[in-house]
Amino acid sequence: MINNKINISLNKELRKKYGVRNFPVVKGDIVTIKSGSRKGEGGKVIGVNHKNKKISIEGITIAKADGKQVEFYVDHSNIVITKLDLSRPGRENKLREITARKNLPPPVVETEEEPKSSVGEYIEESVENQDESEKNLDESEDIKENSDEEEIENSSENESKDEKGDDSED
């Protein structure tokens, strides 16, 4: 039977953050190659071959003899996870289970999503934004009207000066 999990070590920052040394890699994690001919390169995991314990990384390819670019699979021991993809439902729970077994404080998991607010708060915010936009619109209309009136006054003054100037020249 094939073991479906390939555990890969986490970088030092993630080890401190989550209290775990290694974690199963999945499609979507961000990794870096730590040894081999592609050392220092990295990217998003696009494929995991569980049978051979090899990982395919986005942007890392190799040229075939006919010139085609194919995925370059890297051995799992040569990779370090630099960012976990916690959007999958069970991964965050798995981190909590592991830390609980080790009697560590629960990991602080940061989500990239905006905090969800209640509907009432959303409505209040949208009403406030609407009021502000209406005020700005009213102010801009007032400024436009004032500038139009000034232009009309200036143009009438210029016309009267031109008329006076025309009479004096004749």
Image: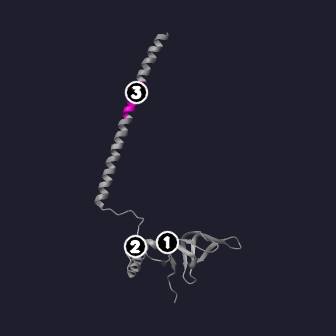
For residue 12, the mark is: 1
Label 2 sits on residue:
107
Residue located 46% across and 11% down the image: 167
Graded by Cα atoms within 10 Å as few (under 14), some (14 to 19) or many (20 or more), the crowding at tag 3 reads few
Seen from the viewer's position, the closer of residues 156 and 118 is 118
Which residue type does callout 3 highlight?
Ile
Expressed as whole percent of the image width and height from the top left, the position of residue 56 reads: 57, 74
**Mark 2 → mark 1, Cα distance in angstroms:** 15 Å
Left or right? Give the position of 143 relative to 3. Answer: left
Q: Position of residue 169 (x, y in %)?
A: 49, 11
Q: Residue at x 36, y 42 (%)?
A: 137
Q: Position of residue 109 (x, y in %)?
A: 40, 70
**How far apart are the two marked residues, 3 and 2, measured between alpha carbons?**
69 Å
Provide the secondary structure element on which disc 2 rests.
loop
Q: CA distance from mark 3 to mark 1?
A: 71 Å
Lateral position of residue 77 relative to residue 129, left or right: right
Q: Which residues are magenta?
A: 145-154
Q: Residue furthest bottom?
A: 1
Checking the image for residue 152, the label placed there is 3
Q: Earlier in the sequence, mark 2 or mark 1?
A: 1
Badge 3 or badge 1: first in the primary sequence: 1
Disc 1 residue type? Lys
